Each structure stands twice: as C-alpha cells, then as structure tokens.
C-alpha cells in the first residue's frame, strides 16, 4: 500500500489521525511506531495527546493504539474503563489484565506496512 502521510497536514494531530485510520481491524500499533512513521521518533507522548483528543473524530479508531508493551494506557480516555478492551475484543484482539495478548501477532507497524 502506498501512502504518503507526513506533511499532508500542517497539524501533527491530523497526521496522527490519518495514520490511525489506516490501522486494520484486529490489529494494533504503538504511539512510538506512529511517531517514528511521521518522522518524529521522539514524539510518542504527542501521539498520546492526539489520541486523548481523538474523541472529536468518530472515524479515528483510537482503541487500536497501545503502548510499546501492549498495555491499554489510553483506556481512561474512553467512555468507561473497559470500553477500549471491549472494542478490541470485538475485533478479535485478546486482552488480559489491560494488556494485549500475543502482541507480536496483531502488531501493525506503519513504517513496514505503509510505503512512504
């Protein structure tokens, strides 16, 4: 798949949202992977802030973004403390103790999956 996300928008958050919209159902990625793909490898925290504000966009599947260890660190920004897990479970992603099980099998890395 050929996609050119970086600099499509001047706004970093909107670039993040464009990448998150490309994460396939049943897959997850990390804040750091998105930051690296966008050319800002030290901006994982900013990607997290973008995810915290993603509730303004119904087409951004923020539940598919976890920390590098597969932890559901953004779950407190959903409508309930279990909503993120429920959304992932509906897509076939197994979660136990707020952590993705078998992370490597569902991990989606935009740097490898999308061509710049």
Image (cartoon, rainbow, N blue to C red):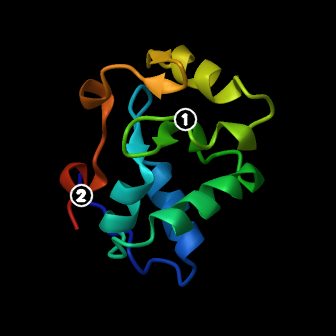
The residue shown at (41%, 36%) is 28
Farthest bottom residue in view: 10
The residue closer to the viewer here, 32 or 63, is: 32
The correct choice, above or below, for 1 with respect to 50 in the image is: above
In this figure, which residue is indicated by the disc labeled 2? Answer: 111
Residue 23 appears anywhere in the view = no
Q: Nearer the viewer, residue 44 or 90?
A: 44
Q: Nearer the viewer, mark 2 or mark 1?
A: 1
50 sits to left or right of 116: right
At a point 39% along the width and 65% down the height, the residue shown is 35
Q: Is residue 90 above or below residue 69?
A: above
Residue 72: which numbered mark, if any?
Answer: 1
Residue at image x 45%, y 63%?
44
Q: Position of residue 77 (x, y in %)?
A: 73, 44
**Looking at the image, is mark 2 or mark 1 earlier in the sequence?**
1
Residue contact at pointers 2 and 1, CB within 8 angstroms: no
Whether 105 is drawn above or below 112: the answer is: above
Q: Residues within 10 Å of mark 2 (few under 14, many from 20)?
A: some
| Residue 50 quadrant | bottom right
């Amino acid at each position: 798949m050929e996609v050119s996300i970086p600099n499509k928008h001047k706004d970093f958050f909107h670039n993040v949202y464009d990448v998150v919209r490309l994460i396939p159902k049943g897959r997850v990625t990390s804040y750091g992977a998105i930051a690296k793909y966008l050319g800002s490898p030290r901006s994982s925290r900013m990607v997290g802030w973008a995810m915290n504000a993603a509730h303004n966009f119904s087409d951004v599947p923020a539940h598919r973004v976890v920390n590098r260890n597969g932890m559901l660190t953004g779950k407190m920004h959903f409508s309930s403390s279990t909503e993120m897990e429920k959304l992932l479970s509906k897509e076939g992603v197994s979660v136990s103790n707020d952590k993705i099980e078998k992370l490597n099998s569902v991990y989606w890395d935009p740097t490898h999956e999308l061509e710049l």
